[in-house]
Amino acid sequence: MTVWLGLALLLLLAGLTVWQAAALSRCRFWCPSCGRLFALPWYRLLFRRHVNDEWRLACPHCGQKGWCRVKREWKEG
């Protein structure tokens, strides 16, 4: 019984992690080195370090690694 409960909890946590990465892949990130905005696919955001709205990422344009701020695009409608 406890094995099934542990497995269900593990699957739930994995699903929530993938859901968060998929939601974040709709956002753009601002590179502090070159100043360009970029997006990344969800699988590149799975286990990245972050503090609030800053994520430790490598810019696909200049290649610099740094703390990139999220620019969220909210659409009404």
Image (cartoon, helix red, strand yellow):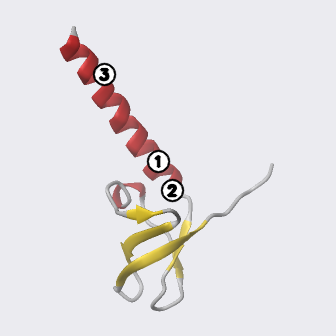
Q: Earlier in the sequence, mark 3 or mark 1?
A: 3
**Residue at the disc numbered 3:** 8
Q: Which of marks 2 and 3 is nearer the N terminus?
A: 3
**Distance in Å between CA atoms under marks 2 and 3:** 24 Å
**Residue at the disc numbered 1:** 20
Q: Please name the amino acid that badge 2 sits on.
A: Leu
SS class of the residue under badge 3?
Answer: helix
Give the camera-side residue of 32 and 63: 32
Q: Please name the amino acid that badge 3 sits on.
A: Ala
Marks 3 & 1, CB-CB < 8 Å contact: no
Residue occupying the far right of the picture: 77
The quadrant in which residue 6 appears is: top left
Give the number of the disc on residue 62: none
In the rendered image, residue 14, in percent from the top left (x then y), is placed at 33, 37
Considering only vertical position in the picture, is 63 above or below 77? below
Taking 6 as reference, is 60 left or right?
right
SS class of the residue under badge 1?
Answer: helix
Residue occupying the far top of the picture: 1
Taking 24 as reference, is 12 left or right?
left
Residue in the image at 39% along x and 89% along y: 62
Marks 1 & 2, CB-CB < 8 Å contact: yes
Residue in the image at 35% along x and 54% along y: 46
Dot 2 crowding, Cα within 10 Å, few <14, some 14–19, many 20+? some
The quadrant in which residue 2 appears is: top left
Dot 1 crowding, Cα within 10 Å, few <14, some 14–19, many 20+? some
Residue occupying the far left of the picture: 3
Residue occupying the far front of the picture: 51
Q: Please name the amino acid that badge 1 sits on.
A: Gln
Taking 72 as reference, is 47 left or right?
left
**Residue at the disc numbered 2:** 24
SS class of the residue under badge 2?
Answer: helix
In the rendered image, residue 20, in percent from the top left (x then y), is placed at 47, 47
